Amino acid sequence: MMKLAKLPDRKPVKLTVTVNADLNRKLRDYAALYRETYGESEAVDELIPFMLEAFLENDRVFVRARKEGIAGTAQEGRQSKSS
């Protein structure tokens, strides 16, 4: 078996969401703080995927559930392919 596992699907998927006005203001404020912190401006839609990724990676209950094979997760699909 190779040391490097098969690379995951890297095809981007476009999602469209609608947020309320208050969340929109918070997202713009977050982008402004990002600009102040790093000296680079990023659009909210560019930041959101990274924000979601960080949120999911730090949700311990979610991470544990995926490791245990909750129904409907990509983790489950990977396990069945490797069997």
Image (cartoon, rainbow, N blue to C red):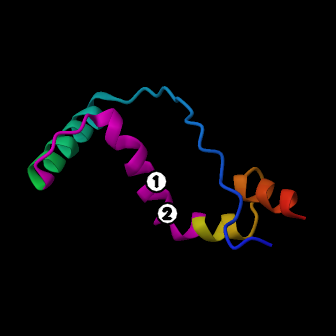
Most extreme residue toward the front is: 2
Q: Is residue 46 above or below residue 52?
A: above
Residue under label 1: 53
Residue under label 2: 57
Q: Secondary structure at mark 1?
A: helix
For the image, the number of numbered tags is 2
* Mark 2 vs 1: CB contact within 8 A: yes
* Magenta region, residue range: 38-62
* Viewport quadrant of the N terminus: bottom right
Residue at image point 37% right, 42% down: 48
Task: Point out residue 82 in the picture as x, y percentages from the top left corner.
Answer: 85, 63
Q: Is residue 39 above or below residue 11?
A: below
Drawn side of residue 50 relative to residue 61, left or right: left
Q: Amino acid at mark 2?
A: Glu
In this view of the protein, which residue sits in the foreground, 10 or 22?
A: 10
Q: Amino acid at mark 1?
A: Glu
